[in-house]
Image: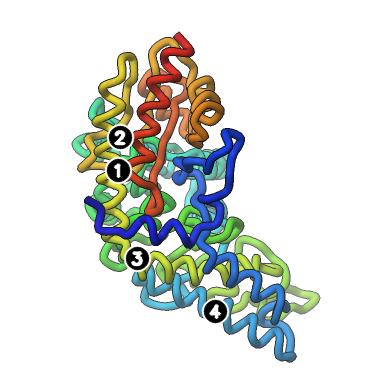
């Protein structure tokens, strides 16, 4: 039984009672792509636009002062959520992708040279592959790859052999967005630091679901997104150790990121403004604070336990269906993500049918992880991903609908 009062939680999410094409509320199981927002987040953003919206840090009037205070309060909420040492280490970005690109462009261009190595894993999201491929092409660096085992986990035995004094940065996900695999972040950090490499953690699928302390991890950089943790889209966080951020050149130039500009050049602003050029996504940033507060009030440890309970039930029911293959480790070693295929049926056909006959929303395709799908000999999969507002009944309805889909498609 879940420790969460899911019925009470669901009342905070207006969209969960919205009627879909089937004439009943949609069963939303696409949370790994993007979560829904509670009314507390929606109302906080509405209040900004209705009562005090103005640009931040730039004007002397009252609206700007109020908005700036809310904006910086959201930064502090993010700092506390992940246990960062200073708010200067919290950079607002547009999302995880932007955070990783910032590190690859700023830290990477300043620190890598021809022949240096970048270590990635085969289970990475494209957002944690392509920026490093671009960096390697610019600097003449070499990418090496941590394999994924048949048990859907990183090959930790092979990893030390891939690390050397040539390795300058390792970039790995904390939790796979396809497999749900929970990776041993602290161990990976230790491995990277042992050879003098920096390490970036893609925490987009981790921080929204379990308690995280970046100082305990010891990671150099951590990136995550607001829209995957009940917050608005268009806002994300890049955490970086202060001494590293101080040494990095600005990535984007423009307003806000400078202390002074002359005809001869410019002096960058102090952190975190140094990496926040231009007008930021103000309302979205402010909406992040109530999302964080909501998760903390519910309790991230309870959220994680609830998701694992649902994932266990999904595994039990789906593996009983003939022709269904589940991709990912056993439920106790993964987050609330269950990806699967059906023999003889394309994943898109399954997803469309689940939506049309049962009002169930799942993701289909390669989930921005084509190398991982190639590793397991498939081009696409269906992915059901749960969150704090999902129920056991919804998981059971998923399994029933998959059975119906099989009968209709084969």
Tag 4, which secondary structure? helix
Spatial distance from mark 3 to mark 2, Cα to Cα? 23 Å
Label 4: how many Cα within 10 Å (few below 14, some 14–19, many 20+)? some
Residue pictured at 26% horizontal, 22% vertical: 320
Q: Position of residue 93 (x, y in %)?
A: 57, 61
Location of residue 316 with respect to 111 vertically, above or below: above
Q: Gap between marks 1 and 4, in whole Å? A: 36 Å
Task: Identify the residue position indicated by label 2 in the image.
Answer: 314
Q: Is residue 112 left or right of residue 341?
A: right
The correct choice, above or below, for 331 with respect to 216 in the image is: above
Give the mark nearest the N terminus, 3 or 4.
4
In the rendered image, the vertical position of residue 140 relative to residue 213, given as above or below: above
Q: Position of residue 307 (x, y in %)?
A: 31, 48
Q: Which residue is mark 4?
A: 72
Q: CA distance from mark 1 to mark 3?
A: 17 Å
- Residue 191 makes an appearance in the image: no
Q: CA distance from mark 1 to mark 2?
A: 6 Å
- The reply to whether callout 2 and callout 4 are in contact (CB within 8 Å) is no
User: How far across and down, in percent of the image, does residue 150 sit?
Assistant: 25, 25
Residue at the location (55% across, 52% down)? 15
Distance Cα–Cα, label 2 vs label 4: 40 Å
Residue that carries the numbered disc 3 in the rendered image:
298
Q: Residue at x 51, y 53 (%)?
A: 36
Q: Mark 2 vs mark 4: which is more N-terminal?
A: 4
Which of the two discs, 3 and 2, labels the residue nearer the N terminus? 3
Q: Quadrant of residue 59?
A: bottom right
- Residue that carries the numbered disc 1 in the rendered image: 310
User: Do the CB atoms of the residues marked 3 and 2 lie less than 8 Å apart?
Assistant: no
Tag shown at residue 42: none
């Amino acid at each position: 039984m879940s420790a969460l009062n899911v019925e009470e939680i669901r009342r905070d999410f207006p969209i969960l009672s919205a009627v879909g094409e089937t004439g009943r509320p949609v069963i939303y199981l696409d949370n790994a792509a993007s979560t829904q927002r509670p009314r507390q987040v929606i109302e906080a953003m509405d209040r900004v636009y209705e009562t005090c919206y103005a640009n931040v840090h730039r004007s002397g009037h009252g609206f700007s002062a109020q908005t700036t205070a809310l904006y910086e309060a959201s930064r502090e909420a993010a700092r506390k959520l992940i246990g960062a040492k200073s708010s200067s280490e919290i950079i607002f970005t547009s999302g995880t992708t932007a955070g990783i690109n910032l590190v690859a462009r700023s830290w990477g261009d300043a620190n890598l040279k021809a022949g240096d190595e970048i270590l990635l894993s085969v289970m990475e999201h494209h957002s944690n592959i392509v920026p490093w491929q671009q960096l390697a092409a610019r600097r003449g660096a070499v990418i090496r790859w941590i394999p994924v085992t048949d048990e859907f986990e990183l090959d930790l035995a092979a990893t030390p052999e891939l690390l050397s004094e040539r390795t300058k940065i390792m970039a790995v996900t904390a939790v796979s967005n396809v497999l749900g695999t929970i990776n041993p972040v602290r161990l990976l950090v230790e491995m990277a630091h042992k050879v003098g490499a920096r390490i970036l953690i893609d925490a987009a699928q981790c921080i929204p679901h379990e308690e995280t302390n970046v100082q305990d991890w010891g990671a150099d950089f951590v990136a995550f997104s607001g829209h995957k943790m009940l917050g608005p889209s268009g806002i994300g966080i890049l955490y970086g150790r202060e001494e590293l951020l101080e040494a990095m050149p600005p990535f984007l130039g423009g307003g806000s990121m400078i202390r002074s500009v002359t005809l001869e050049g410019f002096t960058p602003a102090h952190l975190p403004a140094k990496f926040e050029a231009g007008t930021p996504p103000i309302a979205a940033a402010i909406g992040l604070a109530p999302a964080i507060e909501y998760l903390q009030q519910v309790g991230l440890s309870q959220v994680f336990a609830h998701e694992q309970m649902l994932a266990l039930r999904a595994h039990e029911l789906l593996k009983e269906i003939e022709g269904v293959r589940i991709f990912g480790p056993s439920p106790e070693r993964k987050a609330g993500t269950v990806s699967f295929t059906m023999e003889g049926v394309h994943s898109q056909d399954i997803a469309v049918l689940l939506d049309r006959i049962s009002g169930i929303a799942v993701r289909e395709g390669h989930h921005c992880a084509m190398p991982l799908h190639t590793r397991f000999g498939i081009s696409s999969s269906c992915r059901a991903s749960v969150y704090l507002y999902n129920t056991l009944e919804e998981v059971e309805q998923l399994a029933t609908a998959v059975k119906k889909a099989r009968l209709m498609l084969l």
